[in-house]
Image (cartoon, rainbow, N blue to C red):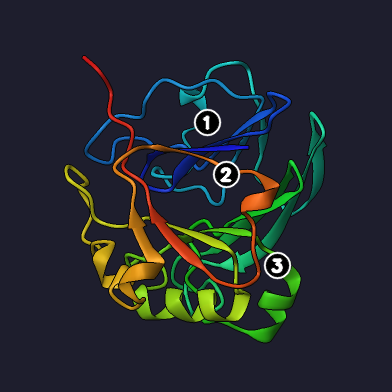
């Protein structure tokens, strides 16, 4: 499978069969989304920086409610969570999406804001690849994200929803999160796409991959 980082909290996930899903497409956050087509779009919550489904071509099916789904052989589970640590009183609910692609369990946490709990962890496991917000302010911060990683114990972690060049949002940079790990556990790839195979998944360690947002060529 391939993971393509389109910026902010948006990823395109593509199975080897060709089935493609875009998670949390964004509106005007200070930069534009790259051109992308998909079979499906998942929306964690109805905020402008996560629900711009119309930006995705290919007439995709949009999943934005809790439940279990399937498209093109990809199993999808949407789990309810909260955008804050006050049971949604501040910023509402948030959907966490899990995908099974090529035998790999991928979890996109959306704008998760609630504290780590045994109940939520149990609902998510197993997770091989974790796409996690780390910027704080509107989501969990670096320290809270580290706790989720420690509890979930995925093989691969890709941070999202952090401060990058051009982003018009007051949140922390990714290094606030990556500095919490040993240097040998972190790799800055300087590219926007990562290809994974089932053999890349190991229970022996966790690797942090910082992807570079895909830029629009003009």
Q: Is residue 4 left or right of residue 200?
A: left
Q: Earlier in the sequence, mark 1 or mark 3?
A: 1
Q: Is residue 198 left or right of residue 13?
A: right
Neighbourhood count class around disc 3 (C-alpha, 10 Å): few under 14, some 14–19, many 20 upward: some
The quadrant holding residue 40 is top right
Residue 210 lies, in percent from the top left, at 36, 53
Measuring 45% from the left and 42% from the top, which residue is drawn there? 10
Which mark lies nearer to you, 2 or 3?
3
Q: Earlier in the sequence, mark 1 or mark 2?
A: 2
Neighbourhood count class around disc 1 (C-alpha, 10 Å): few under 14, some 14–19, many 20 upward: many
Q: Which residue is under mark 2?
A: 43
Q: Which residue is under mark 1?
A: 53
Residue 144 lies, in percent from the top left, at 43, 79
Q: Residue furthest left?
A: 165
The answer to whether marks 1 and 2 mark residues whose Cβ atoms lie closer than 8 Å is yes
Label 2 residue SS: loop
Label 1 residue SS: helix
| Closest to the observer, 168 or 36 | 36
Q: Which residue is under mark 3?
A: 124
Label 3 residue SS: helix
């Amino acid at each position: 499978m391939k993971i393509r980082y389109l910026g902010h909290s948006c990823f395109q996930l593509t199975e080897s069969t060709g089935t493609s899903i875009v998670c949390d497409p964004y509106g005007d956050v200070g930069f534009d989304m790259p051109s992308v087509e998909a079979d499906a779009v998942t929306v964690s919550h109805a905020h402008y920086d996560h629900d711009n489904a119309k930006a995705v071509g290919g007439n995709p099916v949009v999943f934005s409610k809790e439940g279990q789904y399937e498209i093109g052989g990809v199993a999808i589970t949407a789990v309810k969570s909260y955008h804050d640590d006050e049971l949604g009183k501040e910023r509402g609910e948030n959907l966490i999406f899990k995908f099974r692609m090529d035998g790999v369990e991928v979890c996109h946490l959306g704008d998760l804001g609630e504290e780590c709990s045994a109940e939520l962890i149990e609902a998510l496991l197993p997770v091989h690849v974790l796409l996690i917000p780390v910027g704080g302010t509107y989501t969990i911060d670096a320290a809270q994200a580290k706790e989720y990683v420690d509890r979930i114990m995925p093989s691969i972690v890709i941070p999202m929803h952090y401060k990058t060049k051009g982003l018009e949002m007051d949140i922390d940079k990714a290094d606030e999160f990556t500095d919490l790990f040993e240097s040998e556990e972190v790799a800055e790839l300087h590219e926007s796409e990562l290809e994974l195979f089932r053999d890349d998944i190991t229970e022996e360690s966790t690797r942090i991959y910082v992807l570079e947002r895909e830029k629009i060529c003009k």
